[in-house]
Structure formats: structure tokens, C-alpha cells
Amino acid sequence: MSARVRLDRLLANLGYGSRREVQGLAARGRVRWDGEVLRDASAHISLDADLPRRLTVHGEPVDPPAPLTLILHKPLGVVCSHKEAGRSVYELFPPRWRARDPALSTVGRLDAETSGLLLVTDDGQLLHRIISPRAAIEKRYIARLARPLRGDEAAVFAAGTLVLEGETTPLAPARLTPRDPTTAELIITEGRYHQVRRMFAAVGNHVQALHRDRIGGLTLPDDLAPGEWRIATPAEIAAVFGG
């Protein structure tokens, strides 16, 4: 049996306004259920999979309720935090989504100068399952370097003994595969601060461009251009964990 929730509470949690504002929307005939105007904001709505088809606001399908997970092709020049200076990834989504409850959060972070696959979710349990160190989920990065690889980087990264500057705990083993003299794939299972850039700095190189194209078994879709996003399917979420 599907869960049911009051219309005003549902739309307020989805960012369409306060409950009083949602009541006003309904009173003005801006909300429809199965094509019929729904003026009673206290009506209870079934949270079925077909909700966006049955419920419309301002003539548009209602936003998906929680839990919601998005696949984003993060472009360069945007940050993953509300607190950092600069344009935020959250500005790539509809403005009302900033008022969703539960709130959307990035699953880990990519710095402003790193592009690629980023998951965004309001599912706290899923977020913690992915970022938990015990999960050891692989992340694949493509790094373009300032100088040619010297040849021993793969062995250094795979040893599990590399200690980054300012730290005392060695990194977990990582896998490096050269693509050409100044480009390499690097697979890591941790998410330390600026980890990939600091790893290459530790072997005397500098990352000029960095792109993440895979998390677990989920690869960045070819049809998502930088700045574009879509809702993740259950199969794609399972793929993160190798399913």
C-alpha cells in the first residue's frame, strides 16, 4: 500500500512554497490531479511512482518526491558546497529545489577545477553507503599532467605506503594506467582532500586537468553534456555498488 501525504505538506517539501503559499496555489486552481483542479490543499495524495503524471502544478508535472538521486555531469568552474565562494552545482537545478526537504546533497565533492560524474541525492542512507570508507567504492579519474610520467608512479601508488604531505596515514593502494606520456587513468577508493592532485604532486608532477568518469560500476553517460543532469534509475544506483 502506497504512502499518503497532505497536498500542502508534499508541495512545501518539494520547494513550491510554504504550506500557506501552497494553499493559495490550490485555491487559485494552479494544482490539478488527474487533470481536474484540486483546490483542497488538505487532500491526501498517494506517493505512487506515477505521481508526476497525475499531479501537476502550473500545468507542469510535479517534481519527484524523495528519495531522489541525480546523475550530474559537473562542469568546470562550479563548487560542490553552499558555503564555498563561487557558483554552486545546486544552481544547475530548478531554483525551488534549494528549498526541498529533505535537502539535496552532493555525494562527496569535486573541486571547482574538476569535471565529471557527480551524484546528488536527498537519500542520507545512500549517501553514507557510497562515501563510507568501509565500502571502498572505486572512483576513476582521467588526469592530464604538466610533465611526462616518469615510469614508477603505478608502483608507488599501488604499494599502499604513500603518505601525502601533511598527513600521517598512508593511502590505500590505487591503480594507475597510462594513456599517453602525459595522461593517465587513476582509480582510488578513498576521498581525501584534493587526493588525486596531491598524489601526483607527491611524485613530482602537476595535474593540469582532471575529470572523473566512473563511480563504482556507474559510468558517466555519454549523452550528458557538462552541466546536464537526469534522475538516476534504480539500476544505475545499484551499479554504483557493482549491481
Image: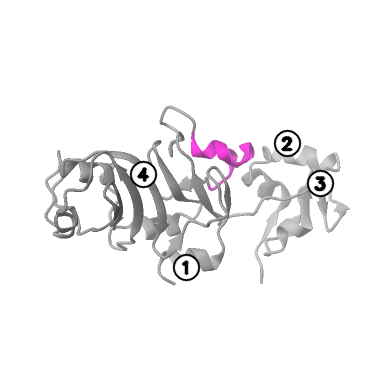
Looking at the image, which is closer to me, 133 or 151? Answer: 151
Residue 108 visible: no
Mark nearest the camera among 1 and 3 is 1
Q: CA distance from mark 4 to mark 1?
A: 26 Å
State which quarter of the image contains the C terminus. Answer: bottom left
Q: Which mark is residue 238?
A: 1
Q: CA distance from mark 1 to mark 3?
A: 33 Å
Q: Secondary structure at mark 3?
A: loop
**Residue at 43% across, 58% down:** 125
Q: Decide: marks 2, 1 in contact (CB < 8 A)?
A: no
Q: CA distance from mark 4 to mark 3?
A: 41 Å
Q: Which mark is residue 21?
A: 2
**Residue at 26% across, 49% down:** 181
**Magenta stretch bounds:** 88-102
Q: Which one is earlier in the sequence, the residue at label 1 or at label 3? A: 3
Q: Which one is earlier in the sequence, the residue at label 4 or at label 1? A: 4
Q: Which one is earlier in the sequence, the residue at label 4 or at label 3? A: 3
Amino acid marked by disc 4: Leu
Amino acid marked by disc 2: Glu
Which residue lies under the disc numbered 3? 59
Looking at the image, which is closer to me, 185 or 198? Answer: 185
